[in-house]
Structure formats: C-alpha cells, structure tokens
Image (tube, grey):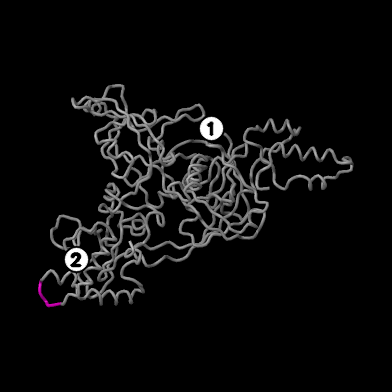
Amino acid sequence: PTRAPTVQDIQNIFSNCTTMEDPKEQNDSQVQEILPPVRPRISRNCSVEQLKEDLDVENFDEDSLLPIGSAVQLYATGADPIYRQPWKVDKQTAWTGSGVCTRGNRIITNAHCVHNATMIQIQRQDNPKKWRARATAVAHDLDLAVIEVDDADFWIDAVTADFAPVDKPIELYTEVNAIGFPLGGSTLCVTKGVISRFDAHLYAHPENLGVLEASKNYHGPIFILQVDSAINAGNSGGPAVDQSGDVVGIASSGIDEAQNIGFVIPASIVHLFLDEVKSMGKWTGVSELGLWHRSLEADTYRLSIGMDAKATGVLVEEVAPLSALFQKVLPGDILTHIDGSSISNEGKVPISVSQQTVYVECEALITCKPKGTPTKFGLLRKNDKGVLTKITVIGNMKPFSPLVPRFHSFDIVPEYVLVGGIVFSRASLPLAISVEKFYGDDFRKCFFEYKKNESHEKVVVVDILRHDINIGYSFETDIKFLESVNGEVVRNLSHLAAIITKLEAEKAELDNSSDDKNFVKFYFQGPSKFPDIVLEKSKISNANQEICKDHAIFNVISPSLLRS
C-alpha cells in the first residue's frame, strides 16, 4: 500500500482472521499471508498504549511503528564547476545519501545530496534495483531537495511516510529514530536517541558553500533540532521518526569532533519548502529580514539614544534596498517587536518549546514564514522633537537577491568575458570557495554590502591567460574589482560584454599614436585615477582567437551574456 495501515486496518485484518471457517486449523504461515507485508504505523491521534489495548497485545513492539520501508538509498554522480575557469568542470566524483518516500510520489532528501549531481539513482530497501531519478526542486538555504522517479513501477507497493503536522508541538527529550544508509554497510540502519535541543542557526550545507554569518550576504538563522542519534555520512536525507511514526524531520549533518551531536531539519521547515514547491513549482529562497542592526546591551548606549530603562530592542543601521522593509523601517529606528514577540537587547526572541522558553535570533521568526506573509514590526522612532515614540509597520516578507550570489545553478552560473587573456566574471560564493585568496580582505568587503538594484553586480578579474598582448600585467596577490572601461562605468557582467562587443566592432587601425581610440583601458576600484590594464584595441581579436585555441575555449564571451 502507498499509505501506512491505520489502527482500523489492523483491527479489520485480525477480525478477518478470527471469522474463518476453521480458525483452529490455521497455522502461522496462513496468518502471515493475511497480514500486510509492511509493519504498521499508528495514526497521529493514537497513542502506543491505545494501540496495545485495541489489539489486546501485551508485548507490543513499538519499533513496528517505524516507517522503515519508506527510507531509500541515493546514489549520485556529479562534477563541480570551476568558476575561475568558467568554461570547464572538475573531475567526476560519486557519493551516496538517503531519502524518504512521501505522498505524491516524491522523495525528500538533502540539497547537499544532489548538489551538482549529473546522475541520480534510487534504491529501495526491499529491491536491489537502482531506479533513475531527477531532482525537481532544491533549496540550498534549507538543505532540502525533492527527487522524482518517473518510472511508475518504482512506486508499486512503495511505503510512504508522513511528516508531522505543522501544529504538532516539538517535544524535547523524547525518543527519535534516525533511519538511513550510513557508511559502514550496505543495508538500512536505525539509530535511537532523543531530541536534545531546539535552536536556530546557519545550516551546515550553505555554510560549506561559503555563506558567512554576521554578514549582509547571510539569509538568516533557521530552526533546527539537535539529536543525540548517530548521524554519519550517508545518513543525510533520511527520516527522523518519533514514537508515533511521524517524520519529525530530515537528518542533515553532524559534528565530527563531538560525540552524539546530530542535526535534523524540522518537519515545519520541510512543510514550508514543500508547500512552495507545490504551489510555485520551485523554491525561491527563505524570507529575509533585510535589516542590519546592532545590539543594545550597553546601558550607556541605550541612555544616549533616549531609550526608556524598561525598553529593549536593537538599533537599525541599514535597510536592504531590495527588502520588504525598505523605506518602511529607517536607519536609526529601534526594532522592539516582531509579531508581538519582544526582542531583547541582544537581538533574540523567546520561543516556547516543551513548556520551556528558549531564545533564538530574531531573524528566525522571518525565515520560517511563507512568502508574502504580512508581519508586524514594533519600532521606536524619534519624532520631530527628538523623542522616541512607538510605531508599527507591516511588511510582506520575501527573499531578496544578495550582492554576492550564493548558490550554483540557483542564483549564479559560471559566465565570463575574455578580453586579451583577461578573464572577467561575477563575484560569487562559488568563485570565492574555489580560489582561496578570494576570501581576502578586499573580497570580504562584498559580503558587507547590500545589492542596490537588480542590475547591481561586482565584476572581478578571475585570471589572466598568458599571451603577448598582456605581458606585464599580474594576477598573483590581490582581487581586482572592475569599475569602468574607457570611462564607462560597468554595471554588471552583461554590461561589460556589451561594451567589449561594441569596442571590438570599431575596427581601429594601429597608428602607434597615444590616441585613446587605439586602446581599451580598464580601471579597477581603488584610489588611483589611472588605468590598471591597457590593451591595444586592434590586437585584441587575434589574441582572443589564439588564446581560445590554446585553452580549448569555444567562445570569448559566454553566449548567455549576449542574449541577456
């Protein structure tokens, strides 16, 4: 069956067994044939004790409630792009992971299990065959992905699991079972533990992709569960199941240096992801606050800005121009409440979990919201007399584009403009993690800027391919941010492509003069008013052809840039 049997199903089965013509002549094998092949899972509203009473079973095995058959193993093969040489990809690698079958013929797993995968195969626990699959939606910020298997035969008799309802409370210190296919064997593995902590922070996957906390490139903390069940490599993407058989989350990561610390993405976050995928066909990112603020822990600081002794909150220093709160919240405002929840001077809000109060970063109240959700913000703002007064603003929360794109194939792809061996591309996180020096002080400045408008990008030199035309120019120590070409300010990479295409079309003749029309001059950001690189315009075309031939490059400009 595609659903787990309910208590009524089990009662009907036992009823049929006891109304046969000769029940005394039944043997164990006959009864076994009548029972379902899948171990039953109780309904959400039924306790283990109630099930024992209904079935009149003294020694009921609570492990039988686990939807073990819903877990699948994932086999993936892929290759990472090389952003410093955007026309290339890295060598092919292979890895494994886990997933869980759900209603609607979908498999849920982690985003890092399918990241840069070119081939995905799925294997059920009860069948050695590997089925071809494809990722249809990926959320790198949530570390979640949807996989679909098009072959209908895969879903015949497949067991599916249900995620805990959004309104089901999280019970700390209750038992949880992590189901998956970790390293160390080829068969299914179940590890027991408890939910030991409820928190909100940056997930391991986006952190590994370069997202920095406490930067303007950070999308914000997201709710997460900590468990002491063993979660090892290969467990990723598998279900974490409570005692009632509900999937309370998806296993995501662990800490190698610590013992029995694993992290599970809560079912509420999974629902947030799946609801948007079902309604929009894709994931567009978590809702973001878009406020750069500072804590107000110092009494003297609060006194200096006129705050009452009992008031708490954080001081807004900047508002992201593309955020939902731009021109609604102003620099200098004090953010005191989100949807009625009081914000502490440290920037945290209280959350009630299992009759306990825990404090998380205030942004976590935003990242858990569906797109467009109206959200009420309480502020203190100085009036015309310089006195702080209470005001309320409402914003429909949404994601917005960062200045430095975060995730390959989501908001960035490796594109380039090649001019006389100088390779230009966009500043991005995939570029940063591929070139160590891109995490230097100059590049880090990009993480502390908001994107001004949708066309605003940082264009950088990523490499210089040696040729006679560029002898004397070096790319060894620092990052070069392009500012202008021949006096024209470069807005983004597509704009640079248009500028270079126009300049190359101007068939200039070399006359050994210093006339500006004979040269292409590149100015980088910095104090100097003089060009950093100068190329002879008439030699660029031939040099490009020779460089492309030597390095097996098909185009001097990414074709997608010419179409934009």
- Is 425 located above or below residue 157 in the figure? below
Residue in the image at 49% along x and 56% along y:
114
Q: Name the residue under label 1.
A: 169
Q: Quadrant of residue 161?
A: top right
Residue 471 rendering spot, x and y as whole percentages? 21, 72
SS label for mark 1: loop
Q: Which three-letter amino acid code belongs to the residue tagged 1?
A: Pro
What distance separates the C-alpha of mark 2 from that of mark 1? 61 Å
Where's residue 310, x and y in %?
31, 22
| Res 361 → quadrant | top left
Magenta segment, prevailing SS (helix, strand or loop): loop
Tell me what residue is drawn at x 23 percent, y 75 percent: 468
For this rendering, which residue is in front, 287 or 197? 287
Which circle marks residue 160 in the picture?
none
Question: Quarter of the image containing the C terminus?
Answer: bottom left
Compare residues 191 and 277 and report the one nearer the observer. 277
Q: Which of 252 and 101 is in front in this view?
A: 101
- Rendering coords of residue 101 (x, y %): 59, 49
Say which element carries label 2: strand
Ranked by sequence position, the earlier of labels 2 and 1 is 1
Per the rendered image, the range of residues in magenta is: 510-514
Residue at 32% x, 74% y: name it.
Answer: 548
Check disc 2 and give the amino acid type: Ile
Residue bearing mark 2: 533
Total marks in image: 2
Q: Is residue 258 magenta?
A: no
What residue lies at 72% left-to-right and 39% top-to-bottom? 9
Is residue 283 visible to us here?
yes
Q: From what the image shows, is residue 402 above or below residue 10?
A: below
Q: Is residue 188 found left or right of 493 in the rendered image? A: right
- At label 1, counting other C-alpha atoms closer than 10 Å, the crowd grade (few under 14, some 14-19, many 20 or more) is few
